[in-house]
């Protein structure tokens, strides 16, 4: 939480009643520090500062970057001579009004300090060295005196081009830059600086798809909503493979025709690869791509292009929501139910919900797409707050996959193995037909637990209350919470017994071993976020899978959703029960969504697909709903249960998490917060404070954690209550952290 230690030595926080009598304009600047307030500075008139400008300000003994949040009544004159002066303005696109409003909104909603929220949107322009000019070369017409084969290739590669960058030419001619430089020295090539051409514009009429009747109707309704240029939200609910993407492409086309920008948000980078190609096939060029893997230089270009309007469509991860769009006319949140949209550290915000907020601020339409909508969006659609477009069938007469279950109680795999006989048989049949099979297991590594056979010792993370996961490829034991890594020893550290350590339970690496034994010689690939080589490599492998290069895919949730693998006809879910027994109130919803998504990868091409769930609880409502295809019933029951329990979206929930290096101190502080909460005059009488309780993940990174839950009705001012409680409670001791998580997704 906010730490107001030595504020006195820093500039004076602004208040709005300041008025005339001096020389310069006063601006209020927000700095990306974990503080809530803006600071007043004098602005030299020659800087001509406007709200949103990015500036340098003296702050304490240093200089920091900041954003002009407000310019005091134009022409207002400084009375306070003690104000410091803005040191300079960056040559970077300003933060537009809509974006600043969004950041203020998020700070109020999440209770995160405004300066911390600002970090989501602020780039540091000063960090990049000036860009080296790229050199283009063109032929002069003069032939070299000595025409080597390499030089001949260069001239041939250049033929038909007015100019090329040196690098591109070297690559095309398969020569080193030295060869090209030699030709320049000899006067056979001339050089000039290659100018950055504006990015090519996507063409709304480049190659429209022929839509099915259902898609046509949905697209028409969405296009009308976009053209309306009013805030509104539509939930596009279509079964896996129904062609939701094609439908929202038409909405993007409409935005483009109107001259507006569109943002498509995706939960994972791995998903964007195929999307970019599909987009290019439809609109002629790729959209700009935004995620953590984009280079700083490219980020700078996208920032500038989005601000100027030169870039019209961006596809990106949740952080793309904070780009300085100048004329945003459409927001799309694909796979809107995904948990990856919730940021769980720093500012705890949900990117889908904040996309809806940005849509309201920008007065534009927001489309949420999913085969398995979140309960929240489903309820909003049912109540008429959101439009609801449904695509109940797959595109092109393709059938939904046939689902069946294997009861692991009756047909367990042999000890130490994870695939039961009927699933192995199904895979054999699939391979015999030259089709692909996917084994899905959402566990990275080799084994989730390592035990000593002799004394029962378990390998625990020294910093977290979690077991170390064995990663055999990396020859290490790794904590999935803090990243702590240690070598797997030969002897048990507790009893000293040698060669007594055994893996317990499966991870994808171990499953891969079993698969290799069962299907020797069949090309198989294991895909999880551990894949060396990062997102580039992941793209290549996913493309290879789509092209049919591998026959068996072993994968975590990374391959479970969004992808189109035309030859994949069998999905085997190795452990369908994983998410059900965790005590997570959203466990049923998550399991339902995940299983629906992963089984939805089967049969998307010409051949029909099937999916097999290995489960110990074939009678569980989630399994029954999946197997019978009765998702309506599942939603009805889950919504009923949420309503009865007063959970979102019927009630509001916030978690307050106290974490500290000392268990007793953390607990004591959590109790003090609970006392402060109980002592509040409870405005609406419906606020319930639960806890504190030790968090299920009691220790993370050496911090002991306690949780409080605050529950109230939908229209109660939950944030106001929380703010009052935090203000009334004693200040947390040094190194203790109090985190507020409004609308928590995770309860660990
Ligand atoms: N109108 C169309 N014309 C041609 N192909 C189409 C059309 N609609 C959908 N398809 C094809 O059908 C497949 C599924 O479409 P898409 O990926 O858009 O489905 P989706 O609803 O997003 O599925 P999921 O929820 O599983 O991601 C894709 O290969 C897509 O190219
Ligand atoms: Zn750990």
Image: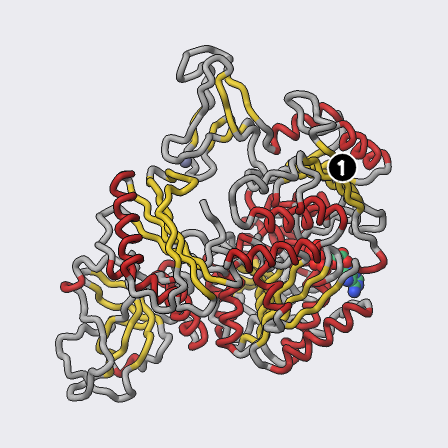
> What colouring does the structure picture have?
secondary structure
273 on left or right of 177: right
- Residue name at image x 18 percent, y 83 percent: 78
Give the tally of numbered discs. 1
Question: Which quarter of the rendering shows the N terminus?
Answer: bottom left
Residue marked by disc 1: 551
733 on left or right of 113: left
Q: Position of residue 228 (x, y in %)?
A: 62, 82
- Viewer-proximal residue among 406 and 494: 406
Name the secondary structure under disc 1: loop
Q: Position of residue 570 (x, y in %)?
A: 77, 41
Residue lying farthest to the top in this orientation: 497
Is 345 above or below relative to 703? below
Query: What is the quadrant of residue 234 in the picture?
Result: bottom right
| Residue 531 in view in this figure | yes
Q: Position of residue 738 (x, y in %)?
A: 32, 52
- Residue name at image x 44 percent, y 58 percent: 653
| Residue 155 in view in this figure | no
């Amino acid at each position: 939480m906010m730490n107001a230690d030595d504020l006195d030595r820093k500039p004076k926080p602004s208040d709005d009643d300041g008025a005339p009598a001096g020389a310069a304009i006063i601006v209020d600047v927000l700095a990306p520090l974990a503080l809530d307030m803006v600071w007043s500075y004098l602005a030299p008139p020659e800087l001509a500062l406007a709200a949103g400008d990015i500036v340098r300000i003296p702050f304490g003994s240093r200089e920091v970057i900041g954003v002009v949040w407000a310019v005091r009544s134009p022409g207002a004159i400084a009375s306070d001579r003690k104000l410091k002066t803005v040191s300079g303005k960056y040559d970077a696109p300003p933060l537009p009004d809509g974006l600043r409003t969004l950041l203020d909104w998020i700070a109020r909603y999440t209770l995160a300090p405004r300066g911390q929220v600002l970090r989501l949107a602020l780039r540091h322009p000063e960090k990049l060295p000036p860009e080296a000019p790229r050199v283009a070369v063109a032929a002069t017409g003069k032939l070299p005196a000595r025409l080597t084969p390499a030089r001949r290739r260069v001239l041939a590669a250049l033929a038909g081009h007015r100019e090329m960058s040196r690098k591109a030419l070297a690559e095309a001619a398969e020569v080193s830059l030295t060869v090209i430089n030699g030709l320049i020295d000899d006067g056979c090539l001339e050089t000039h600086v290659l100018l950055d051409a504006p990015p090519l514009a996507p063409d709304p009429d480049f190659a429209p798809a022929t839509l099915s009747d259902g898609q046509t109707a949905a697209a028409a309704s969405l296009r009308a909503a976009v053209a309306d240029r009013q805030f509104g939200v539509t939930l596009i609910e279509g079964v896996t493979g129904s062609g939701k993407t094609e439908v929202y492409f038409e909405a993007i086309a409409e935005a483009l025709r109107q001259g507006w920008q569109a943002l498509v948000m995706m939960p994972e980078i791995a998903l964007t690869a195929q999307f970019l190609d599909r987009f290019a096939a439809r609109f002629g060029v790729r959209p700009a791509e935004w995620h953590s893997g984009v280079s700083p230089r490219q980020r700078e270009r996208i920032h500038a292009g989005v601000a100027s309007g030169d870039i019209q469509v961006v596809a990106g991860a949740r952080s793309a929501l904070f780009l300085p769009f100048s004329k945003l006319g459409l927001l799309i949140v694909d796979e809107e139910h995904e948990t990856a949209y919730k940021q769980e550290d720093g500012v705890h915000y949900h990117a889908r919900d904040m996309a809806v907020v940005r849509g309201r601020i920008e007065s534009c339409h927001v489309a949420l797409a999913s085969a398995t909508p979140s309960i929240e969006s489903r309820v909003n659609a049912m109540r008429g707050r959101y439009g609801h477009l449904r695509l109940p069938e797959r595109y092109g007469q393709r059938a939904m996959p046939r689902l069946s279950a294997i009861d692991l109680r009756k047909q367990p795999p042999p000890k130490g193995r994870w695939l039961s006989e009927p699933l192995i048989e199904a895979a054999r049949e699939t391979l015999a037909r030259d089709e692909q099979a996917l084994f899905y297991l959402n566990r990275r590594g080799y084994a989730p637990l390592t035990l000593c056979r002799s004394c029962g010792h378990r390998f625990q993370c020294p910093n977290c209350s979690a077991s170390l996961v064995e990663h055999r490829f990396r020859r290490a034991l790794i904590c999935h919470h803090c990243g702590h890594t240690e070598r797997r020893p030969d002897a048990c550290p507790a009893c000293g017994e040698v060669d007594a350590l055994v893996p317990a339970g499966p991870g994808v690496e171990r499953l891969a071993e079993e698969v290799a034994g069962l299907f020797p010689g069949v090309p198989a690939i294991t895909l999880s976020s551990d894949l060396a080589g990062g997102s580039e490599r992941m793209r290549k492998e996913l493309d290879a899978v789509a092209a049919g290069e591998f026959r068996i895919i072993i994968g975590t949730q990374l391959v479970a959703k969004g992808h189109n693998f035309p030859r994949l006809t069998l999905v085997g879910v190795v452990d369908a029960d994983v998410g059900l027994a965790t005590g997570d109130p959203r466990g049923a919803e998550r399991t339902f969504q995940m299983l629906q998504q992963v089984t939805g990868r089967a049969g998307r091409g010409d051949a029909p697909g099937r999916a097999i769930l290995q489960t110990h609880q074939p009678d569980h409502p989630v399994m029954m709903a999946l197997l019978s295809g009765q998702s309506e019933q599942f939603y009805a029951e889950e919504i009923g249960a949420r309503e009865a329990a007063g959970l979102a979206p019927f009630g509001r929930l916030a978690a307050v998490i106290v974490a500290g290096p000392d268990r007793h101190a953390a607990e004591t502080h959590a109790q003090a917060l609970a006392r402060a909460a109980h002592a509040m005059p409870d405005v609406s009488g419906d606020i319930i404070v639960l806890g504190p309780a030790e968090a299920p993940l009691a220790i993370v990174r050496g911090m002991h954690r306690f949780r409080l839950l605050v529950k109230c009705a939908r229209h109660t001012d939950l944030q106001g209550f929380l703010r009052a409680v935090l203000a009334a409670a004693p200040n947390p001791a040094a190194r203790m952290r109090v985190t507020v998580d409004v609308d928590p997704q995770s309860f660990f």
